[in-house]
Image (tube, coloured by chain):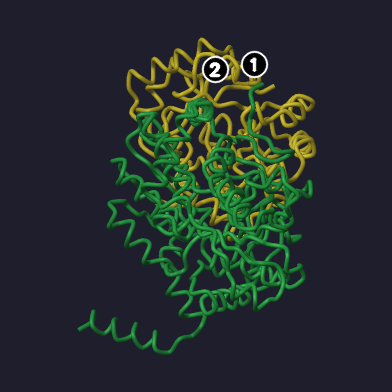
Amino acid sequence: MLESYIKERRKSRDILLMTHIVMGYPSFEDSFEIVRQMVEAGVDLMELQIPFSEPMADGPVILKANQKALEKGSSLTKCFDFAQRVAKEFPIPFLFMSYANIPFKYGMEKFSDKMAKINIKGAIIPDLPPEEGEDYIRAMNKNSLSPIYIFSPETSDERLLYLSSFASGFVYCLARKGVTGKKTAFSNDLAVYLSKCQKATNLPLAVGFGVKDKADVDYLKGKADIAVIGSRTIRIVEEKGVAATGDFIKSLV
Amino acid sequence: MKNRGYYGDYGGAFLPEILVATFDELEKEFERIKKDPSFWKDYETLMSSYSGRPTPLTFAGNLTQKFGGAKIYIKREDLNHTGAHKANNVMGQGMLVKQMGKKRVIAETGAGQHGVATATMAAKFGFDCTIYMGEVDVLRQRPNVFWMEQLGAKVVPVKDGTRILKDAINEAFRDWVTNMDTTHYVLGTACGPHPFPEMVSYFQSIIGKEARKQILDAEGRLPKRVYACVGGGSNAMGLFSGFFNDPVELIGVEAGGKGLNSGRHASRLCSNDASAGIAQGYKTYFLQDDDGQMKETHSISAGLDYVGVSPILSHMHDTGKARFESATDTEVIKALQLTMQKEGIIPALESSHAFARAFKEAPCLSKEEAIIINQSGRGDKDIFTIADAVDDPEWKEFIIEKANEYNA
């Protein structure tokens, strides 16, 4: 179970790291090498994004990575094969991240069965709120997989509790409004918001959107369980090459 | 559970969490104005003093004679201020924004008509305004870009994805998730998450309300069929809604592009290339591949070049409440030329799709019967595209000379 893995792992670490890649960007070989370096550098869990042509919640960096991956022929079949391979090779939990149309088109139940079969532990689907996700939630529960839900600074207290009632594994807290890959102010407001999130759930909290360096990760210690590094690693790959990812991760812990 | 805007299997609100509160507020406000009879009254007053409503229903005597069948009437949405039905939706949402106390509006635009209408509304109501427009559309609709900027709007060319309407919608959503406290997204068509399909159709229903009354006044009977082009579907919803409870056949005409077998079209409901999917916050028929990736679309008209379609129309398609056809780029140009020459009326390329289909069917109907074509917009905005399509040598010469003047 994802939740017990996180809680166990937290006993020996102040904060865990979750990173994100777009499968097939810049290529599947590169994606594999990035995963290898990240795991060796100490990443605790990873999001594998299945690229989608309309990634509404993503900012320019991940948006472009989605497009490039698709242009280079990243398909759902190739993503499943890749995910199966890394889940088998590396000893950390992997999650899918994508948009609702991908599992919807494949079939919600079939998609979840496939995840269970290839040992993917959960999924983050930002445009599938619980109100629209009945089939998805049922299929995930059937396979003991975690549907990861998102808290935002705009979410009312009442809705935080509503979302927690469906959440499993951990809760993903957006550090701010906006899309991925923009600047976040790590301020007192964030701390107040996170303590509100904590009250709404017993699950571990992950914080993402704008986490970019050691100072940000340190700030989150004691306030959250997982720091999520998303767009930043894609930028590192673009600027310094695949070989630089391991060192970047090591610089965060 | 509260109403999430489902029409059969289609619609819904597939929202990122960050926007849930914003949509809750929008829905609440929309429900409030729907129940307030003074809002609709104020809306009609505004539309009559600012946008020339009611727009006429023109009897097209020469076209009727040419086809020798049903009497052809044209609902003149082109005579709205800014030249298209888009004004109906935009002014209604503008009034709502004013009541919500927001100070900034954003919008996507394809052909540019919705962008121009939004920029006009923003100028009138005193809002800041940003318009997102695919780079491809910026190139093919330059005159509208010029007007939007002159009206004080900021036009942002969208360089991601296929660089057309759907990409502009994604980009507008990205703006909105950052600025929802101050900003309202004036979605231009009857698509997107609930309550947009319902709200946009509500404001556009003014078309159908007028048209029904006008045809009864003119003919003393209901029309046999009514025709509207379908991009997102707002002008079609507007006209159709006037006849929902009548024995009138509703025909939506999609962009056939280079032909339905060419793979280069934007026909979601009348081709076999689309299937149910979820994108841009709602569920409907999308032109997509087996993995669920959206396909490239093609149409001579920027306003019909859209990968999805109103969930309300998808439901009407499945239940047989409306019939959907397509018209190819070539048929559309022919219909446009004929309408200009016979009636002195210049329909937009989008609207010309409805004309093309109506011309095919009119001869099969009896002379006692009447049909209505919705002229959703005027065609003079399309001067560059139309001039290319009719391959006018003198126009080309003029453009070359004009360019030389700038180069001198």
Residue B111 shows up from this direction: yes
The residue marked by circle 1 belongs to what chain?
Answer: A
For chain B, give the colour.
green
Q: Nearer the viewer, residue B395 or A14?
A: B395
Point 38% across, 33% down: residue: A213
User: How much space separates mark 2 and mark 1, taking CA atoms?
Assistant: 9 Å
Q: Nearer the viewer, residue B61 or A63?
A: B61
Q: Amino acid at mark 2?
A: Leu
Which residue is identified by label 1?
A165
Q: Which chain is yellow?
A: A
Where residue B2 appears, as percent x and y from the top left, is: 63, 23
Q: In the structure shown, which secondary structural element does the residue marked by tag 1 occupy? A: loop
Where residue A80 appears, as percent x and y from the top left, is: 71, 46
Q: Are marks 2 and 1 on the same chain?
A: yes
Marks 2 and 1, the one that precedes in the sequence = 2
| Label 1, residues with CA under 10 Å away: few <14, some 14-19, many ≥20 | few
Whether residue A135 is situated above or below residue B169 in the rendered picture: above
Point 31% across, 51% down: residue: B153
Per the rendering, the mark at residue A160 is 2
Q: Amino acid at mark 1?
A: Ser
Point 39% across, 57% down: residue: B82
The quadrant in which the N terminus of chain A is found is top right
Where residue B318 appears, as percent x and y from the top left, is: 77, 48
The answer to whether mark 2 and mark 1 are in CB contact below 8 A is no
Per the rendering, the mark at residue A183 is none
